[in-house]
Amino acid sequence: MRGWIIIAVYDKLVRDRIPEIINANGKKCRFSQVSGEQLIAGLEAKLLEEWREFLDSERDVEELADILEVIDGLAAHLGSSFEEVLQLKDRKRSERGGFDDGIWLEWVED
């Protein structure tokens, strides 16, 4: 009689080297490559996943690095680059400021 085979189903976008790492650990996996809208949707879902992991980690900066990696991938697959995103960030900081001073807007009179 054969033993049970346990398969964990992930059905999500992972980093490029994950199948290689799984195989190196003596395990088997099935993967495919996606592109276009499926890739963008996978990256968007991954961004939410990484954001939740950051919140659950009690603000571990390593989780912030994962968020940046997903943003880098999103930028590239949207026809931009991480460098362009950083330039846009810097422009907005120059025009409107950053979040260094902890300004909490309570109300605005119209």
Image (cartoon, rainbow, N blue to C red):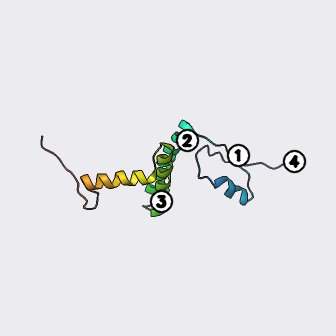
Q: Earlier in the sequence, mark 4 or mark 1?
A: 4
Seen from the viewer's position, the closer of residues 54 and 32 is 32
Q: Earlier in the sequence, mark 2 or mark 1?
A: 1
Q: Secondary structure at mark 2?
A: helix
Q: Is residue 74 left or right of residue 5?
A: left
Residue in the picture at 50% in, 47% down: 76
Q: Earlier in the sequence, mark 4 or mark 2?
A: 4
Q: Which residue is mark 4?
A: 1
Above/below status of 104 relative to 109 = below
Q: Which residue is mark 1?
A: 30
Residue in the picture at 55% in, 41% down: 39
Q: Residue furthest right?
A: 1
Residue in the picture at 39% in, 54% down: 86
In the rendered image, residue 34, in percent from the top left (x then y), is placed at 61, 41
Q: Secondary structure at mark 1?
A: loop
Seen from the viewer's position, the closer of residues 11 and 97 is 97
What is the C-alpha distance between the residues marked 2 and 1? 17 Å
Q: Earlier in the sequence, mark 3 or mark 4?
A: 4
Seen from the viewer's position, the closer of residues 16 and 12 is 16
Cβ–Cβ under 8 Å for marks 4 and 2: no
Q: Is residue 41 left or right of residue 97?
A: right
Q: Quadrant of the C terminus?
A: top left
Q: Which residue is mark 3?
A: 65
What is the C-alpha distance between the residues marked 4 and 2? 41 Å
Number of the front mark, 4 or 1:
1
Q: Secondary structure at mark 4?
A: loop
Q: Which residue is mark 2?
A: 39
Badge 4 amino acid: Met
In the rendered image, residue 103, in percent from the top left (x then y), is placed at 23, 57
Badge 1 amino acid: Arg
